[in-house]
Amino acid sequence: MNRIVILGAGYAGLAAATSLAGRTRRRSDVRITVVNADERFTERLRLHQTASGQRLADLRIPDLLAGAGVEFVRGWVTGVDAAARRVRIDDERVLEYDRLVYALGAVADTAAVPGVDENAYTLDSAHDADLLARRLAGLGGGTVVVCGSGLTGVECAAEIAERHPGLDVVLVGRQEPGATMTPGARAHLRRALARLGVRVVSGVEVVKVLPESVELAGGDSVPADVVLWTSGVRVPPLAAAAGLAVDERGRIVTDPTLRSVSHPQVYAIGDAAAVRQRYGVMHGTCQSGMPTGVHAALSIARELDGRQPRPFRFGYLHAPVSLGRRDAVIQFTHPDDSPKRLYLTGRAAVWYKETVSSSGWPSFRRLQRYPAVGSFAWRRGGRYTR
């Protein structure tokens, strides 16, 4: 029996599980197990909506895996013994594996700045987003400071400002919002934030988060009734503790086929993997996470058939950003994630963004039924990755 254990049931983990189940459904010598801390599937692309108080579909992982022949184990992964090929769940149960797919993702980096862990909200899970939604609903007024002017921070600030017009929303960060976009797309983004009443404080560094304010380098501070932290991510130390080769951020270093360079029976996918392409190390997004899961499944299926896995190639396509429910901006990109001149705004961008956000979980059923489709589901990058 080939025991394949997949740790994590986010976009990447479920893409790997359903695609592998589809590719091995005629084999009786393969057992696939998915481990996740919660039965609920987290639509990370929509957590800013949850945080603003909107109700989303209650998607359950066992339902998404129905008919796939995949065992689901609910529990926290508390240890990995890469030498013995064992995984410990809740410090009580042990799963042995022949191949491991590591898809445990990343979380907000709350350790880099003093006070973040104690005084700021994050969007690491649906539960975290629900906690923030309840806090915002209980505010009669006041100031919400969103720390981090990247695309996640922009979406959160816009969503909260639109949903709670009585609150002052301040977006604080090192870069100007939309810094990676073309001037036209960036200008639209800034106009949308201004229309929603979001005050932008860019070119600053947060050095401390206090219960009622955010301190900036140079001595200035921003009063805050609520702080949301979206600046930077980190990978939990589980992989490093297991003896797997990791980079400076704790991500598992992979070879071109997505196998760990130190333990080739371990595949690393999604945000937990340091996947290098010709243009550099990929950054974690759903856009790249699901393709890594599909490729890992394809590679394992090839190994089971006695063939060698092929190198993974990926090129970025776009950077979709919602600006509340009635506006958005879509920056189209070259495969190396640098911006093209083409971008969408307004209603067309809203439709595009909603289509992208809604495409994740329905894909799992398609990957299970028609696994070959997954092989053509992402951009390979052409000369950028050759």
Image (cartoon, rainbow, N blue to C red):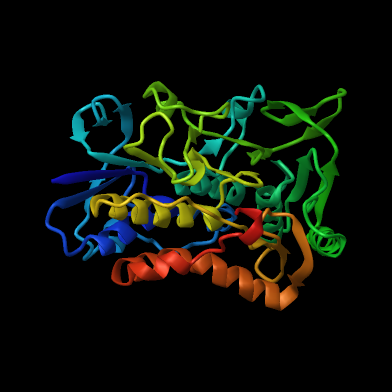
Q: Quadrant of residue 340?
A: bottom right
Q: Is residue 50 visible?
A: no
- Say if 216 sits above or below 329 in the image: above
- Say if 366 sits above or below 122 in the image: below
Q: Is residue 216 left or right of residue 367?
A: right
Count of all numbered marks drawn on residues in the image: 0
- Say if 48 sits above or below 66 in the image: above
Quarter of the image with the C terminus is bottom right
Q: Is residue 282 left or right of residue 74?
A: right
Percent across and percent down for residue 337 are 69, 54
Nearer to me, 315 or 180: 315
Percent across and percent down for residue 12 are 43, 52
| Residue name at image x 80 percent, y 42 percent | 175
Percent across and percent down for residue 256 are 48, 44
| Residue name at image x 20 percent, y 28 percent | 92
- Say if 169 sits above or below 272 in the image: below
| Residue name at image x 67 percent, y 38 percent | 231
Q: Quadrant of residue 75?
A: top left
Q: Is residue 179 left or right of residue 303?
A: right
| Residue name at image x 57 percent, y 40 percent | 122
Q: Is residue 110 visible?
A: yes
Nearer to me, 162 or 335: 335
Nearer to me, 210 or 244: 244
Nearer to me, 341 or 115: 341
